[in-house]
Amino acid sequence: MATSLDGISSDPVTLVVNVNDINDNSPSLTFPDKTVKIQDGRVLEPFLLKINDKDSNDVNHNIIIFVGSAAKFLSPELVSSNVYRIQISGVPEIGGYILDIVAKDLSNKELKESRKSLKIEVLNSAGKARFAHARYERKISFDKLHTGNPLIQLQFNGEAIENIQFVFLDGNPGWLAIEDFGGNVFVGDVPKDGVSPGDYTVTVAALERQTQQIIDRCEISLNIEGTQISKSMFNAKVFSITVPKEVEKNVVIEPLQKNEKREMNLISDSIYAWGDSMEIVHIPSDIIKIESDSVIINALALQNLRGLQ
């Protein structure tokens, strides 16, 4: 962490050092052995898929692909590192389906893919009433995001619009708003610090106004363009560095923004390391030192480690 001359401390920043990992392990899939049931346009019980890989995320590029009869209306959604959930991306008919799930590493074609099958049962159908498009996309500059500005007009077919209620189902960053009658998506309350550039994906559901059942859903993809000046005193929240096993020179990291003059402190209880078998290795805290505006990690200590955080 960094401390100003007035004694005000910043949030701590994590330093991660990965030592010479090789992408030589195939990914493997794990998920519960049960039938996934879909009713009223949603998965009845939470269902998560996980990719297990002994290699670190820095060297592999694992993805999940859906194939089979159920892939027409289901898609994978990443919820955390290597963990996915099943997302409904279409309107299925009632019946039984097979979903073939494939995990593969795109960065090494020699590695074997992992493939498993999953039974899908659709208990009822949303019928012919549905959004005109499964996905709506819009690009806009971040400095054009003002409260009330319209972004996307959703279109719905097969049902009188007065019988439909539009709601955000998932992914609303907080500054989006929607007219529940007309389906107009617009800019709501903009944060004081503005909206960060990047990609935002939001799921919208069309509900039957009387029963509140989901009739259909769609995705909105917003690409916010532009750059903003970082208000953080650090260059990044996480610093990830890979060094060779036989590293000879100390690793030097300069975490502060240019012209930032701060006193940095090291939280010794937050330091941990692991060996080649991923076992926890106890190390003295003095292998990491702070000198002036730099964080210095002892090279000799790294030679006996697989990773340090």
Image: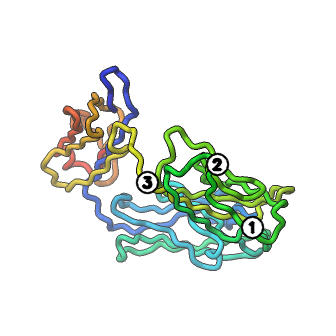
- How is the model colour-coded? rainbow
* Front position in the image: 232 or 87: 232
Mark 1 neighbour class, 10 Å CA radius: few under 14, some 14 to 19, many 20 or more? some
Residue tagged by mark 3? 226
* Front position in the image: 70 or 207: 207
Q: Position of residue 163 (x, y in %)?
A: 84, 60
Farthest top residue in view: 6
Circle number at residue 148: 2
Vertical comparison of 268 with 142: above or below: above
Mark earlier in primary sequence (2, 3): 2
Q: Are the residues at dot 1 and dot 3 in contact (C-beta closer than 8 Å)? A: no
Residue tagged by mark 1? 156
Q: Position of residue 225 (x, y in %)?
A: 46, 56
**Label 2 to label 3: alpha-carbon separation:** 20 Å
Q: Position of residue 262 (x, y in %)?
A: 28, 29
Amino acid at circle 3? Gly
Q: Nearer the viewer, mark 1 or mark 3?
A: 3
Amino acid at circle 1? Phe
For the question of whether residue 49 can be seen, the reply is no
Vertical comparison of 187 with 92: above or below: above
